[in-house]
Amino acid sequence: MKRFRLLSPVLVLLVFVSAGQGSASAHELKEDNGISAVLHIPPDDNPKSGQDTLFYFAFSSQQPGFDLGYCKCQVSFQASDNRLNTAPLTQDVSDPLSASASLTFDKPGAYNVIVRGQTGTSADSTFSLNYLVRVVAGTNAAQTAARQTASWQVILLGVTGLVIVGVIAGEMVRRGSHYTKDHAAER
């Protein structure tokens, strides 16, 4: 019992440390030239290939009067040095410092999500925020349908086997053929 009392604070500390490490990397804050943003990918910050992914950015600024509505902001999605797509950020109407963009990744891998913008007319009013995003393998409709078909085939095969065993057992009972220890000893 004393060992458990000594180990319990250590175990609790390990749980908190490991839980904290996972959440710290999920919402990464990037900053450039006084503009910063946190990237969130709903629902769990794990984009999947073959599925539409929403990228949600929560901005903050050290520049007075920063307004996303007047920012010439766009987001680029890149795999290695190959640009997949560039699109303007769509400002959230309920939060003037939030914006989003979406993309469907064809395959799993590491991608750069780069937000660039210009908040004014001078050259020093530009910013660039680069996030590394890991896309995991997702399932598309064809893969899901194939899995469902395979599942039904296994179920159908199992039911067919049970029916055959039931028919054979029923036929044996109907004919009066009972297999007993005495019957087996005679052979």
Image: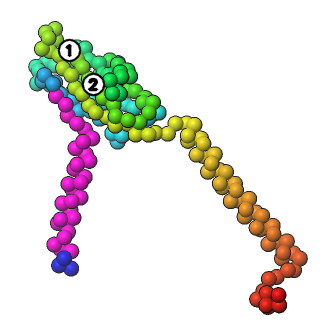
The image position of residue 114, as x and y in percent, is: 27, 25
In the rendered structure, which segment of residues is drawn in magenta? 4-31
Q: Which kind of residue does numbered mark 1 sit on? A: Gln
- Mark number for residue 109? none
Disc 1 or disc 2, which is closer to the eye? 2
- Residue toward you, 50 or 109: 109
The structure residue drawn at horizontal position 17% and vertical position 78%, both measured from the top left corner, is 2
The image position of residue 29, as x and y in percent, is: 20, 34
- Residue toward you, 111 or 5: 111
Q: Tell me which corner region of the image, top left, top right, bottom left or bottom right, holds residue 187.
A: bottom right
- Mark number for residue 118? 1
The furthest residue to the right: 175
Left or right of 107? Residue 175 is: right
Q: CA distance from mark 1 to mark 2?
A: 14 Å
Secondary structure that dominates the magenta span: helix
Residue 129, visible in the rendered structure: yes
Residue 8 vertical placement versus 80 (above, below): below
The furthest residue to the top: 121
The residue under label 2 is 114
Q: Which kind of residue does numbered mark 2 sit on? A: Ile
Left or right of 178? Residue 67 is: left
The structure residue drawn at horizontal position 21% and vertical position 62%, both measured from the top left corner, is 12
